[in-house]
Image: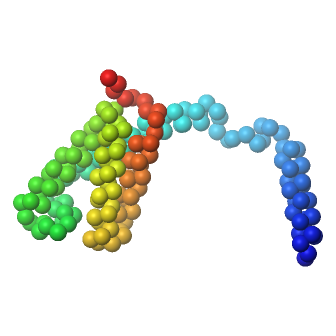
């Protein structure tokens, strides 16, 4: 097929698709989601993301505080039976729990999500370098992305304002 013939064929296909699209009534081309529902999702999704991140951080923080010995194996370059590893896990658990509570209560959500993102980035990098990529790294990478999204969102609902 020559270049000229391919060009004519492409123009004809574009013309036919434009004609077919113009023939479809406006109602059939509209979104299957009603405008009001879509607007509600857009309005509330940053808040749902913040609350979800808060729940995840609070959950893991409380688990680290309740059973720190189960988490000492994740402290790099320190014996998991040492007191230092136990202390680091307790501090980490406290920090996660405080960040989770702040996000759930709507207290400084941008600051809390930024600190959460940095903490999660450290976790992802540390786990990647010490144990390689795993399902835990993939999960924490997703939570990191959620923290970044919460940090970037401008419209939050259910936030304590000064």
Q: Is residue 140 left or right of residue 73?
A: right
- Residue at the farthest bottom position: 1
Q: Which color scheme did the rendering employ for the protein?
A: rainbow
Residue at 29% across, 52% down: 119
x and y, in percent, of residue 97 in the image: 23, 44
Position of 37 with respect to 150 (left or right) is: right
User: Measuring 14% from the left and 55% from the top, which residue is drawn there?
Assistant: 88
Depth check: 110 or 160 in front?
110
Q: How many marks?
A: 0
Q: Farthest residue toward the front?
A: 4
Estimate the x, y position of residue 72 in percent, counting from the top left: 16, 62
**Residue 62 appears in the rendering:** no
Q: Quadrant of residue 39?
A: top right
In this view of the protein, can residue 160 be seen by the observer? yes
Quadrant for the N terminus in the image: bottom right
Q: Residue at x 33, y 72 (%)?
A: 132
Q: Position of residue 71 (x, y in %)?
A: 19, 60
Q: Residue furthest left?
A: 83
Left or right placement of residue 38 versus residue 72 in this view: right
User: Where residue 130 sits: x, y (%)?
Assistant: 27, 71
Q: Is residue 10 left or right of residue 72?
A: right
Q: Residue 51 sits in which quadrant?
A: top left
Q: Quadrant of the C terminus?
A: top left
**Residue visible at 32% across and 51% down in the picture:** 118
């Amino acid at each position: 097929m020559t270049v000229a013939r391919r060009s004519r064929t492409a123009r004809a296909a574009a013309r036919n698709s434009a004609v077919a699209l113009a023939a479809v009534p406006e109602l059939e081309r509209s979104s299957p989601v009603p405008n009001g529902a879509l607007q509600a999702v857009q309005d509330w999704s940053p808040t749902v993301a913040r609350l979800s991140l808060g729940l995840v951080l609070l959950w893991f923080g409380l688990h680290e505080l309740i059973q720190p010995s189960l988490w000492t194996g994740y402290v790099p370059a320190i014996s998991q039976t040492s007191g230092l590893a136990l202390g680091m896990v307790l501090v980490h658990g406290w920090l996660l729990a405080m960040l989770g509570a702040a996000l759930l209560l709507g207290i400084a959500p941008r600051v809390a999500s930024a600190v959460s993102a940095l903490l999660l980035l450290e976790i992802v990098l540390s786990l990647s370098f010490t144990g390689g990529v795993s399902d835990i790294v993939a999960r924490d990478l997703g939570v990191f992305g959620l923290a970044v999204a919460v940090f970037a969102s401008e419209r939050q609902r259910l936030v304590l304002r000064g």
